[in-house]
Amino acid sequence: MTVSPLSGKRILLLIGGGIAAYKCLDLIRRLRERGAAVRAVLTRAGSEFVTPLSVSALTEDKVYSDLFDLTDEAEMGHIQLSRDADLLVLAPATADLIAKMATGRADDLASTVLLATDTPVLAAPAMNVRMWQHPATQRNVNQIERDGVTLVGPNEGSMACNEYGMGRMAEPMEIVAAIETAFSVPHRPLAGRRIVVTSGPTHEPIDPVRYIANRSSGKQGHAVARAAQMAGADVTLISGPVSIEDPPDVTMVRVETAQDMLAAVETALPADALVMAAAVADWRVVERQEDKIKKADGGVPHSIALTENPDILATVGHAGARRPRLVIGFAAETQNLLENAGAKLRSKGADWIVANDVSPEGGVFGGDRNTVRILHANRVDSLPTQSKDAVAAHLVERIDAFFNGIDTAASLESDPK
């Protein structure tokens, strides 16, 4: 099982005063899921947006806030607090805190910790777009970057002040990825490889209101794209409609229908590998209605004629010279898992099929964990139940092994096919 680069790491999270402070609660949870220990410093302004109790409940540790607290200074002085961590994370990094870092001010616990540390600092700026664009802020940002502070974000988007532009704090998973990068040994085994990943469902419109779709959150496909990018690959992620965050530093292509997805996949080729994690709808309506279909007399809807969607996996699996060297499909089944996945492997021209049981009681669709088996032409490899991020990391390791001619079966429990 792949060990997270955050396992055993100590993170000191300094929470600044801004509406984005609420994201820090999710950030703490995400970090601890990956094995990191998180201790928090909450500024006075930050406590206007999140409470010490909520932060303490998630970190399972004391929350520090007062520079002149005699008990804190006796037990864990600000100097020791600043150094008893592997990384300092400032989120949200407000214009005020950035200015304090740039000028060396230390008039509260957070700014004192930042000045007293010799530990690396990662900052996630968050502020109004005009504040971000102000020459003073840009000077301060340039200064702290010269001082060695690493930035993640800000992003462009809508803000709580009803303005739009650059200044939104990076999302928690973007910050997690930046933290993982800070701790990761710079080993990028898939550097130079092009990998195409599909993710999420497709929506096949019936009329402007209704559509046919599968129950897919896109979490597993997005996790694969994120893991491949972290391994150095040039990743194109082709995603159906999902409500989760885009992985950082991948080429995003958003589609709606199966036909859209096929066209996007063909445009993204050639590639070294294709990972078809999307749950593509098998059928679409023959004739999409331009207006909402109304109830027929008696309340019975009109019959809807369906036709089969293109089989993207089979199309690419049998694409001849344009076929990627490695083609991986996914099989989501509710019965006869190995039998159905094996038939898919043989008929689609795939090299591997990642099979999982998506029966409702398993909670795979929309959940954060997965139990998969990987089918090859001559064997089935079983993986333990684990997070979708861990499944993705394992799959990427196997992709790397494939390109290096290494057989990974020895490290896994293999079932007879």
Image (cartoon, rainbow, N blue to C red):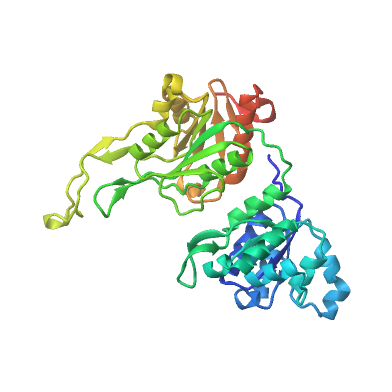
Is the N terminus in the top left, top right, bottom left or bottom right quadrant?
top right
Q: Nearer the viewer, residue 60 or 39?
A: 39
Q: Is residue 236 above or below residue 50?
A: above
Q: Position of residue 393 (x, y in %)?
A: 62, 40
Q: Where's residue 13, x and y in %?
A: 71, 64
Say which quadrant the C terminus sits in. top right
Q: Is residue 50 left or right of residue 166?
A: right
Question: Which residue occupies the foreground of this view, 172 or 279?
Answer: 172
In the image, residue 319 above or below residue 281: above
Name the residue rendered at 17%, 56% in the picture. Answer: 294
- Does residue 96 sit above or below 406 in this rendering? below
Labels in figure, total: 0
Q: Position of residue 52 (x, y in %)?
A: 68, 74
On screen, residue 355 versus residue 229, left or right, reads left
- Which residue is farthest front? 135
Q: Position of residue 46 (x, y in %)?
A: 64, 74
The residue most toward the left is 297
Can residue 63 be seen from the camera position used here? Answer: no
Would residue 376 be seen by someone viewing this image from the given angle?
Answer: yes
* Residue that appears at 79% across and 67% down: 115
